[in-house]
Image (cartoon, rainbow, N blue to C red):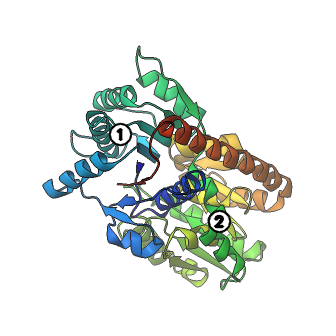
Amino acid sequence: MHLYGAAGHNLGDDAIALAAAHEIASRLPHAAIRVASVAGPAFTRRYGLPSLALNRRSPIGMLRLVDSVRRADVVLLGGGTLVQDRLGLSRFRGILAYARQVAALAKAFGKPLGTLAIGVDELSTPRGREYARDLLALVDALVVRDERSLALARSYAGARPVDGVAAADPAYLLRHHPAAVAAASRPSPHGAYAVVSLANEGMEFGPLLPELTSAVRRLVERHGVDKVLLVAMDTRPGEELAVFRRWLASAPEVSRWAQAVTPRDAFEAHDLVSRARCVVAMRLHAMIFALGRAPLVGISRTTKTDSLLRSAGVRGLGFAEASSGARLAELVDEVMADSRALAVQAEHRGEQEDLARQGIARLVEELTVGRSAAVVEAGASG
């Protein structure tokens, strides 16, 4: 069973692959699991899961992709927001083009094809809508991340009925992985700290940084926080690490309290975020790690984070709103004072974990009944 998502650089996407592989293995205990990743062998060294190096930018890489689909018993796409064109899309570039390629290969080789709680975003280009329609027509078992994704999938499918279900992101289940349980049992070396998680992706952060500075100051001066960890969920230097460097350089006072941190793996990222006194997050998976476990302020920039904040009752602001001086620091005070909200979010988190399990159970049942489960290969590509 190949799972093709976006693991390798983004620790949230790693969390999806790890949690999904663990849950699949609990249902198919004799399955062999392999993870294909843009990080190649580094993914195996980091997590101990057999991996497949995946590089769509070279002819050899494309041949490896074709061969990996050919060797699969079942092909799974996801998780992550695979149906999106916000970060660019062409015939051979972009995550949606990639998902469409994998789906076409699966059908060409006669492989059953499902999706692992993928996100479906609002598409802005005719090519995006065409590729989404093509992809949805090939899927045998459609599982999406939330009700908004399901509604969008149905709108993109055109006249073809979509028989899909809304589940939840598999990353909700990462805390039950043995490695995450082991990390949680160890004492934290950081004392009383808060976390800030941003997402770069070419956005203009200049107006937001003073508001973040005010929020950080509020955490230190009013809420017993000794330091603030700027947690990079994407390990590439050009992503949020670049934003953190600019922020620290432009606001020397922040350097007295804050330090940029690149977790060594998804388990450390999960542990850092879930134990924080407060989390201010743009990244979806930082929000998921914190939900119901640490007071959370969201800064939303996409459909997926809008959906989480709304459904879980999390206080937050849109990116433009937060950048305009719209009371980010005041929201910190509110979430730190509202213990009832944290309890409500913990209950919502439990519901999401149940939904994530149900989504995986549905895929295992629908796509493996009557087939050999001797090989389950979970792959991820960015």
Say if 123 sits above or below 210 in the image: above
The residue that label 2 is drawn on is: 215
Name the residue nearer the viewer: 318 or 198.
198
The residue positioned 59% from the left and 84% from the top of the image is: 256
The amino acid beneath tag 1 is Asp
Q: Which residue appears at 55% of the width and 64% of the height?
A: 197
- Of 341 and 177, nearer the camera is 177
> Percent x, y for residue 126?
30, 27
Q: Residue at x 57, y 73 (%)?
A: 268
> Residue 116: x percent and y percent?
50, 43
Q: Is residue 123 visible?
A: yes
Say which mark, if any, is on residue 85.
1
Mark 1 vs 2, N-terminal side = 1
Graded by Cα atoms within 10 Å as few (under 14), some (14 to 19) or many (20 or more), the crowding at tag 1 reads many
Three-letter code for the amino acid on which mark 2 is drawn: Ala
| Side of 350 where 105 appears, left or right | left
Q: Position of residue 6 (x, y in %)?
A: 40, 54
Q: Where residue 38 is drawn, which disc sits there? A: none
Q: Position of residue 127 (x, y in %)?
A: 28, 30
Name the foreground residue: 56 vs 26: 26
User: Closer to the observer: label 1 or label 2?
Assistant: 1
